[in-house]
Image (cartoon, rainbow, N blue to C red):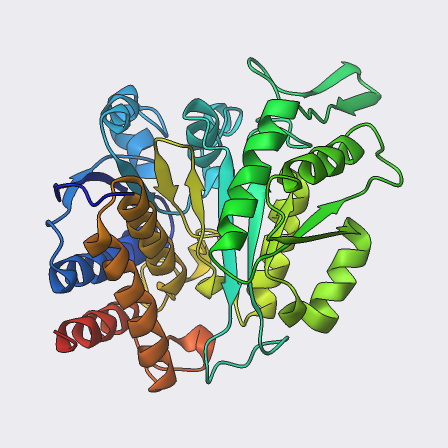
């Protein structure tokens, strides 16, 4: 792809709940430092209300004005939400994250798991990526065009539908194969085709069909239950893993913890035209406001957004900025500057400042 004329990217910044107002600004600080050091155009951040603060100020966890603004942006950084603590009438609605994934059809949820040197990982050597189909499968809030795939025909019966369609499976399979080509050229399909033959069996069959287009990528597959054991025992043997929505959610939390902590697990939700950076962890209300939360996951998510923008817009400076962020995170952690969850003493803001300074020092 030829290099395009660099341009300024307008990105939404939505703080979210709990520790969001602490970790999201930390990520913005680091991303700005990386973009400046790489020589890319400065990012144009657009603050937008979301979550509990938006309910208080606008009467909605995701105000229409925020949604309209996102329509015009290249991507956005979303903090965690604590929808369980919202007033009852707001809890009954899709949470902001789920709504945005569905509204913008962000079909690919990319969740890397890579350990840092010096941080004790449950499975040392882990360096893999979960590619999760994000729009259907067994998640009822995203498996139907209108309403949800979960309902109760009587007070004593609850039913959930799992939806699997060829177009959705083909596009997530291609995303996974393309990603595998940039890594170690090994793709693993996770399913439960021995029992769920018509749904996850369909997923497996179509991934194999798409695999014929990628003869340079090794393809294998495992049942979801067996895969959990394989990951605990030998996660370093896997490269890219593709699976349906709920399996992907579960496996990515597992692999994040195997790498050392969910606090270091980045995540990107993307379509072909938009991307939302959002850490894999929750809002941690128990430590909110204490300036002790680990911002690595949201910083990594932001770096993934830069890389995605750089690829989509043929802007190598943004890709370089993403590389600078990852390298600086590793250097900072290895030097001993860490937040309390990683057995360190650094505050959220101190850690972000250290990472930004490491990036800037590399000029």
Task: Compare residues 84 and 118 and report the one nearer the observer.
Answer: 118
**Quick one: quadrant of the C terminus?**
bottom left
Apparent side of residue 360 relative to residue 341 in the rendered image (left or right): left
Task: Identify the residue at horizontal 27%, vertical 25% (top origin).
Answer: 58
Most foreground residue, 270 or 202: 202
* Residue 194 % position (x, y): 89, 41
Picture layout, residue 278 above or below residue 160 = below
**Which residue is painted at 70% across and 33% down in the image?**
206
Place of residue 195 in the rendered image (x, y in percent of width and height, measured from the top left) = 88, 38
Residue at 50 percent across and 58 percent down: it is 112
Q: Is residue 296 left or right of residue 37?
A: right
Residue 122 in the image: x percent, y percent? 63, 76
Query: Whole-percent x and y of residue 337?
Result: 32, 82
- Seen in the picture, residue 348 relative to 93 is either above or below; the reply is below
* Residue 171 visible in this rendered orientation of the protein: yes
Q: Answer yes or no: is residue 134 visible.
A: no
């Amino acid at each position: 792809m030829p290099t395009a004329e660099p341009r300024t990217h307008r990105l939404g910044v939505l703080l979210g709940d709990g520790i969001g107002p602490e970790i999201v600004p930390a990520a913005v600080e680091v991303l700005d430092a990386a973009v400046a050091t790489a020589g890319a155009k400065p990012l144009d951040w657009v603050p937008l209300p979301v979550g509990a603060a938006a309910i208080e100020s606008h009467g909605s966890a995701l105000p229409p004005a925020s949604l309209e603004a996102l329509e015009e942006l290249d991507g956005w950084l979303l903090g965690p939400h604590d929808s369980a603590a919202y007033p009852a009438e707001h809890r009954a609605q899709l949470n902001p994250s789920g709504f945005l994934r569905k509204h913008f059809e962000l079909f690919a949820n990319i969740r890397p798991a890579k350990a840092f040197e010096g941080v004790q990982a449950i499975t040392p050597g882990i360096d893999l990526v979960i590619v999760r189909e994000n729009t259907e499968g067994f998640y009822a809030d995203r498996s139907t065009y209108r309403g949800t795939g979960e309902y109760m025909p009587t007070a004593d019966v609850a039913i959930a539908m799992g939806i699997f369609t060829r177009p959705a499976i083909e596009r997530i399979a291609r995303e996974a194969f393309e990603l595998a080509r940039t890594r170690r050229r090994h793709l693993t399909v996770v399913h439960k085709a021995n029992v769920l033959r018509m749904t996850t069996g369909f997923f497996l069959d179509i991934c194999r069909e798409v695999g014929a287009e990628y003869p340079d990528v090794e393809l294998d597959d495992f049942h979801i239950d067996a895969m959990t054991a394989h990951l605990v025992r030998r996660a370093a043997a896997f490269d890219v893993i593709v699976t349906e929505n709920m399996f992907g959610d579960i496996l990515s939390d597992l692999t994040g913890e195997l790498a050392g902590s969910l606090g270091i697990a980045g995540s990107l939700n993307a379509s072909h035209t938009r991307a939302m950076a959002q850490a894999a962890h929750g809002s941690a209300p128990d430590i909110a406001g204490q300036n002790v939360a680990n911002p690595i996951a949201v910083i990594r998510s932001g770096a993934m957004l830069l890389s995605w923008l750089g690829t989509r817009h043929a802007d190598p400076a943004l890709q370089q900025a993403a590389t600078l962020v990852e390298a600086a995170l590793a250097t900072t952690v290895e030097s001993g500057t860490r937040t309390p969850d990683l057995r360190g003493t650094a505050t959220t803001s101190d850690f972000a400042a250290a990472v930004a300074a490491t990036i800037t020092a590399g000029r």
